[in-house]
Image (cartoon, rainbow, N blue to C red):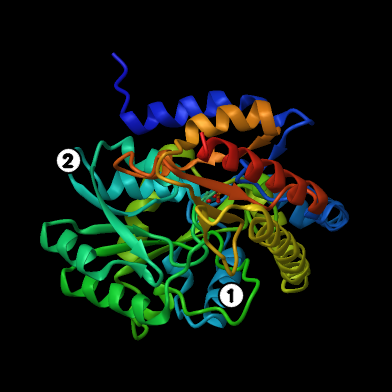
Amino acid sequence: MIVRDARALIASEIRDLLKVADRPEITSFAGGVPDPSLFPLGDFRAVYSDLMADEAAGRRSLQYSISEGLPALRQWIVDDLASSGAVRSVDNILITCGAQQGLDMLARLLLEPGREIVVEKPSYLGAMQAFSMRRPTYVGVNMDEDGPVVAELEAAFKGGARVAYLAPDFQNPTGRSYSLERRLAVLEIARQHGAVILEDAAYSRLIYDGDALPSLLALDETHGDQNAGTVIQLGTFSKTLVPALRIGWLCAPRPVIERLVLMKQAGDLHVSTINQEVALRAARKLFPAHLGILRDAYRTKRDTMLAALDEFMPDSVTYTRPEGGMFIWLTLPENIDSRQLLEQALVDAQVAFVPGQAFFCDQSGRNTARLSFATEKLDRIRAGIERLALLIRRVHNQ
Ligand SMILES: Cc1ncc(COP(=O)(O)O)c(C=O)c1O
């Protein structure tokens, strides 16, 4: 017998609805993927060709390798983390098949049926899909302008929850970030209760305005003790290089890494050696210049979408103004159900978006929607928002 939870059902209904979103006549704000026109194809061509031209490195990259991941790649990640203030060692890093595998492995390590996990309301659907395989009890925490509501987080930990999944930078689906004060408060509360924070840093490098704030990992000072720490951070090259390499990583205290390495051995031995080698060479070659290219391109798209929302949306619709990432979050008038709106939008406005309900652990948020500005061209972003706004005005006044 196959057990299905309500959120999985909503998610699969939405997937069915969005099957038409790929049609060329549809302007899609539904995707959660990077813009493929920004993939550095020429550089990848050179990286692959140089690798295969190098007899020793080429053969090594086609061989099995250790479950932890290539030491040189882990060292690159350690250096990169250090440059943003998080001092860790190679032994704190495990290479995973995308951050998604990290979420799945952490779910298997930390969750069991009925055990509580704190999630933001709303939260990343893919994380909840991974967690739900362990049938945990979700404790949803509301968000304000600065991050998770402290009193709610505290109540969750007081109620017995010991794991929290949080995304402080340009969250999927809202694009929101935490203030520095809230980061510190969240960390302090977790410490007081002996809880572990799973910090999703998938979008943290896609920052378009101002300076980056320190990650929870960076604020979680371990004083050189590889076994210490309240924060486990998930990182990925999916948004900064290309997702198809499937290279992500976990940064965690050593005892956690040791358990996860055994799990990795049992599951799939290791992440593809050649993909790790290519990711390392591409990162060395392309960073930080490529990040600058991505930031400029996505900033322009974000600005175009925000300008169109400002121009066309009625006052009854509110939306986030993200400083990074790929998403803008709409809150529609109470009487609009965004799943019904999507059905109409696909037909009447040729526009797709993701209804917000699936991102809530308690299936609330019926009048919310996620828009991605990442993949469409500027003129289509503007025209698509204009058509969507017209439809919303019509539906709202009915
Ligand atoms: C917030 C967040 N975390 C993790 C992932 C998983 O990324 P990947 O497995 O490609 O590294 C995604 C993918 O969209 C995401 O949006």
Q: Observer-nearest residue: 188 or 226?
A: 188
Helix, strand or loop under label 2: loop
How many C-alpha atoms fall within 10 Å of the one at disc 2: few (<14), some, or many (≥20)?
few
| Residue for badge 2 | 114
Above or below: residue 169 compared with residue 326 = below
| Residue for badge 1 | 80
Amino acid tagged 1:
Asp
**Quarter assignment of residue 280:** bottom right
Above or below: residue 39 compared with residue 195 = above
Decide if residue 122 is in sight here: yes
Point 20% across, 49% down: residue: 116
Using residue 200 as the reference point, say whether residue 237 is left or right of it: right
Q: Which mark is residue 316?
A: none
Using residue 29 as the reference point, say whether residue 50 is left or right of it: right
**Quarter assignment of residue 158:** bottom left
Counting from the top left corner in percent of width and height, residue 282 is at: 74, 61
Point 18% across, 45% down: residue: 115
Spatial CA span between label 2 and label 1? 37 Å
Counting from the top left corner in percent of width and height, residue 90 is at: 48, 70
How many C-alpha atoms fall within 10 Å of the one at disc 1: few (<14), some, or many (≥20)?
few
Residue lying furthest front in this view? 397
Using residue 295 as the reference point, say whether residue 194 is left or right of it: left
Tell which circle, 2 or 1, labels the residue nearer the N-terminal end.
Answer: 1
Question: Which mark's residue is nearer the viewer, 2 or 1?
Answer: 2
Decide if residue 252 is in sight here: no
Counting from the top left corner in percent of width and height, residue 257 is at: 37, 59
Above or below: residue 320 compared with residue 361 = below
Counting from the top left corner in percent of width and height, residue 65 is at: 57, 50
Q: Observer-nearest residue: 131 or 79?
A: 131
Point 72% across, 74% down: residue: 288
Amino acid tagged 2:
Gly
